[in-house]
Image (spheres, grey):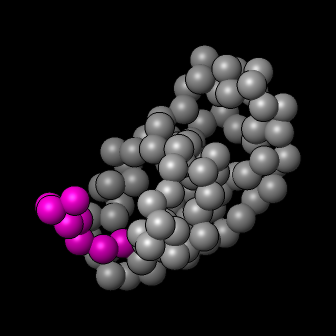
Amino acid sequence: MLDLNDMIIAQLKERDITFPNVKKGVLVAMVTPGSPADCAGFHPGDVVIEFDGRPVESIKEIIEIMSDRIGKAIKVVVKRANDETAILTVIPEEANPDM
């Protein structure tokens, strides 16, 4: 995941005209098969704009929200290519230290 700023957004839009029209958020760069993100329906290129009903601008904010929600469903709003909005439900798991 990558925190977005104006410069990164401009670069991503230069490379891909379908990149969503966002001013902030967290870019999902990759999704691990079988992970909670994969099970929830996240796609590489999604931009997380809302997590558990709160606007988010950084990975740190997402981690703070998830920290006390292990095993509990969280609603996530993402923007996708061509400004499509998707509402996903993710259930965070304990991190596996062996991975």
In this image, 21 relative to 71: left or right?
right
In terms of secondary structure, what is the magenta stretch mainly?
loop
Residue 58: x %, y % from top left:
43, 41
Q: Name which residue lies at 52% across and 76% down.
A: 39
Residue 7: x %, y % from top left:
60, 17
Q: Quadrant of residue 15?
A: top right
Residue 30: x %, y % from top left:
51, 50
In this image, 61 relative to 94: left or right?
right
Image quadrant holding the N terminus, namely top left
Residue 17 appearing in the image: yes
Q: Quadrant of residue 25?
A: top right
Instruction: Work out whether 80 lies above or below 34.
Output: above
Callout count: 0
Residue nearest the observer in this picture, 19 or 64: 19
Instruction: Work out whether 87 lies above or below 24.
Output: below
Instruction: Work out whether 51 lies above or below 6.
Output: below
Residue 55 appearing in the image: no
Image quadrant holding the C terminus, namely bottom left
Residue nearest the observer in this picture, 52 or 20: 20
Magenta span covers which residues? 92-99
Residue furthest out toward the left: 97
Q: Name which residue lies at 42% across and 77% down.
A: 91
Q: Quadrant of residue 8?
A: top right
Residue furthest out toward the bottom: 72
Q: Name which residue lies at 52% across and 68% down.
A: 38
Residue 87: x %, y % from top left:
66, 69
In this image, 98 relative to 41: left or right?
left
Residue 93 highlighted magenta (yes or no)? yes
In this image, 46 relative to 59: left or right?
right
Residue 98 highlighted magenta (yes or no)? yes
